[in-house]
Image (spheres, rainbow, N blue to C red):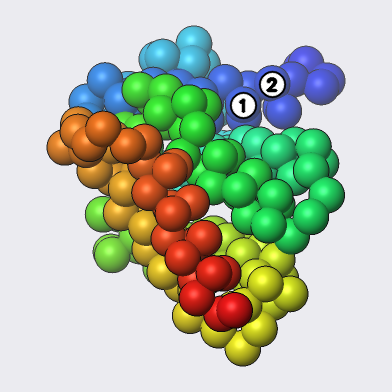
Amino acid sequence: MPKVGMEPIRRRSLVEAAISAIHARGSLDITIRDIALRAGVSQGLAHHYFGSKDALIVSAMRHLLTEYGKQVRMEIKKVGTPRDRISAIIRASLGRDQFKPETVSVWLVFYVHAQVSDEAHALLWVYSRRLSSNLVHNLRPLVGEEAHTVAEGIASLIDGLYIRKALGSFNRDESAEQLVEDYVQKHIEGRG
């Protein structure tokens, strides 16, 4: 007889095991069996909960996106002005929590996986739209009609600098956050 209330615990354990397996392997060259062993459950149970490796991988990314969203909301709650909310989004996007080794591994693999998986691509699109929407909402009072263009620049800088920083190829005296902040400030000042 199944233990009542165990499904959410096992699902989370499998998602965390998938993140760990991706990090250990550095790719999606893992199996449901590898993940199940890490989670301490049977391969059949992993298939029962997720159906496929791809679904489990997408669930792992959804988990990281949920954690990222919580971080963004937590940073935004600390501030009040639109300009400060933009800084909060930048801080959450390029902050220390986003550079845990497992998180970096999954993000980098996920960017590649989104090119071949419709579900992963859709999830990446949702992330991109949310980031853009949050930025545009806060940029409108500061840069008016340029909000979409500036938001696209900020998002591109965040994603590009994230990848460069994650791969260790960002070695400037300025922080990645400061580069994005400088970009935002130049566009705000350029309006006046």
Pick whichever, 95 or 61, lies toward us.
95
Disc 1 marks which residue?
A: 12
| Residue 134 shows in this picture | yes
Pick whichever, 172 or 18, lies toward us.
172
- Residue 164 relative to residue 183: left or right: left
Callouts 1 and 2 close, C-beta under 8 Å: yes
The image quadrant that residue 191 belongs to is bottom right
Mark 2 neighbour class, 10 Å CA radius: few under 14, some 14 to 19, many 20 or more: few
Residue 184's disc is none
Pick whichever, 153 or 63, lies toward us.
153
Residue 9's disc is 2
Name the amino acid type tagged 2: Ile
Residue found 74% across the figure and 74% down from its top = 141
**In the rendered image, the vertical position of residue 151 relative to residue 176, given as above or below:** below
**In the rendered image, the vertical position of residue 182 relative to residue 96, given as above or below:** below
- Tell me the quarter of the image containing the N terminus: top right
Instruction: Identify the secondary structure beneath mark 1.
Output: helix
Residue found 66% across the figure and 36% down from its top = 71
Q: Could you say where residue 36 lies in the image, as x and y percent from the top left?
A: 43, 21
Mark 1 neighbour class, 10 Å CA radius: few under 14, some 14 to 19, many 20 or more: some
**In the rendered image, the vertical position of residue 30 relative to residue 131, given as above or below:** above
Q: Could you say where residue 186 lies in the image, as x and y percent from the top left?
A: 46, 65
Instruction: Identify the secondary structure beneath mark 2.
Output: helix
Residue found 69% across the figure and 77% down from its top = 140
- Residue 105 relative to residue 3: left or right: left
- Residue 147 relative to residue 169: left or right: right
**In the rendered image, the vertical position of residue 177 relative to residue 2, given as above or below:** below
Q: CA distance from mark 1 to mark 2?
A: 5 Å
Residue found 49% across the figure and 16% down from its top = 39
Q: Could you say where residue 128 lies in the image, as x and y percent from the top left?
A: 51, 64
Q: Could you say where residue 118 lies in the image, as x and y percent from the top left?
A: 41, 68
Name the amino acid type tagged 1: Arg
